[in-house]
Image (cartoon, helix red, strand yellow):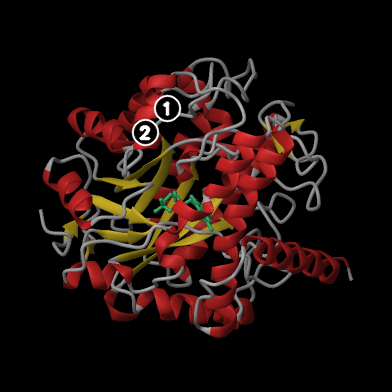
Amino acid sequence: MDIAEPLQLPCGATLPNRLAKAAMTEGLADTTGLPTPELVRLYDLWARGGAGMLLSGNIQVDADHLERPGNVIIDRDLTAAERALFEEWTAVGRANDTHFWAQISHAGRQTMTAINPQPKAPSAVKLDLPGGQFGEPVALEAEEIADIIARFVRAARICKEVGFTGIQIHAAHGYLVSQFLSPRTNRRSDEWGGSLENRARLLTEIVRRSREAVGGDYPIAAKLNSADFQKGGFAFEDSLRVVGWLEELGVDLIEISGGTYEQPKLLGIEGTEPADDPDIAKSTAAREAYFVDFAHVMKEAAKVPLMVTGGFRSRAAMEQALAEDAADVIGLARPLCVQTDGPARLIEGASGLPRFEDWLSLLPGVLKFLTKIKMVRTLAGFATQYWFYGQIYALGRHGAPRPGLSVFKAWRQVEATHKDWLERRRA
Ligand SMILES: Cc1cc2nc3c(=O)[nH]c(=O)nc-3n(C[C@H](O)[C@H](O)[C@H](O)COP(=O)(O)O)c2cc1C
């Protein structure tokens, strides 16, 4: 199937083609979470880049639970002036009939210590990562869970009002909704824990009530892990069942990814502990499109359109996934941090996108070879991710990427930018 073919979603909206820019945290909002001129410049580039749909980076529903400094935040009703900033941002992102969807999230225990040393989570289960970057989580009270649902629904309503053409609930990658889904991180014995149905209740309630808030003709999506790839975690069979429930709730698009901070399979990186199934781990890491096998099985079980994200670089692999009915939309992230018009090039006939992660992965690869020290490997994983943050800063600040940036410089730049943001927020 042709990557340029439009896709009509169950709600009636049409995506102009099959390529989407997947969500990437920008770190460019001001200290109250409002859009800035840098965010406008960044999305102006991406909206001119040929993707049929752009997903925003994760927009947080609680200022005390950011995934990093500089997240966009919608945790309150906006004033007219604040709305105007969002409207300016979404107008740019919608240029050229591009869909611009908001990814709505809550970081839960994956909130950085510098933001909140005691973040709320389903249960008090700390991230198993060295370095003190993440604090001691505190289990949520039932009333607080009700408040979080209301926050997601309010953010969904506001996103529609300020001009996003769809929303996506972030239920992947170990953030709060994903923490509820996993029995490793959700040890609750009330209606929010235990059975899969209970663990999925936060997600299904957010989706059900968001639908009431935005109406039947507005795209609602969810980003879901195909699996967490951790022993006793959210498994593929669980994911299949959740896909079925989301379909019943009238979700328009499910984006399939996988992994968490502890097991960053979303980036094709080995985690700090052995995966639950070494064969699956090997087959997903070795191939170009990390989650396409899972999506294939999901497509057989459900009719809801699927977006598959992770590792796609060659047009042949994208076309194959579409033709074999393993995906309806291809999600692209890292290459677009440098080649912002990658989708347009593919549609015009280019054979593929650049693979920056190959040489960047040399760093954790070498360190892994040289040392078994978990701390060093963890830091190396974050450092390669920071190189992409550095590219996004460059696009937003100067309108052009900096592919010559070293991993070390990118690390220092991100640390300095985070520190500056935190100091300004405190002042
Ligand atoms: C710099 C960067 C920021 C990211 N931020 C987010 C995010 O905010 N929300 C999300 O769901 N995924 C996020 N991701 C994951 C991507 O959406 C995507 O799943 C992952 O990069 C794999 O796709 P790729 O191989 O095309 O890069 C991020 C990835 C990168 C590299």
Instruction: Report if the CB atoms under discs 1 and 2 are less than 8 Å apart.
Output: yes
Distance Cα–Cα, label 1 vs label 2: 5 Å
- Residue identified by numbered label 2: 284
- Residue identified by numbered label 1: 281
Q: Quadrant of the rendered structure where residue 243 is? A: top left
> Please, which residue is most extreme toward the right here?
427
Disc assigned to residue 354? none
Q: Is residue 60 visible?
A: no
Q: Is mark 1 within 8 Å of ligand 1?
A: no
Three-letter residue code for mark 1: Ala
Q: Quadrant of the rendered structure where residue 124 is? A: top right
Which residue is pictured at 70% across the width and 46% down the height? 111
Q: Is residue 302 above or below residue 10?
A: above
Which residue is pictured at 77% across the width and 44% down the height? 133
Q: Quadrant of the rendered structure where residue 393 is? A: bottom right
Where residue 267 sits in the image (x, y, percent)? 47, 45
Q: Is residue 71 visible?
A: yes
Three-letter residue code for mark 2: Thr
Which residue is pictured at 51% across the width and 82% down the height? 41
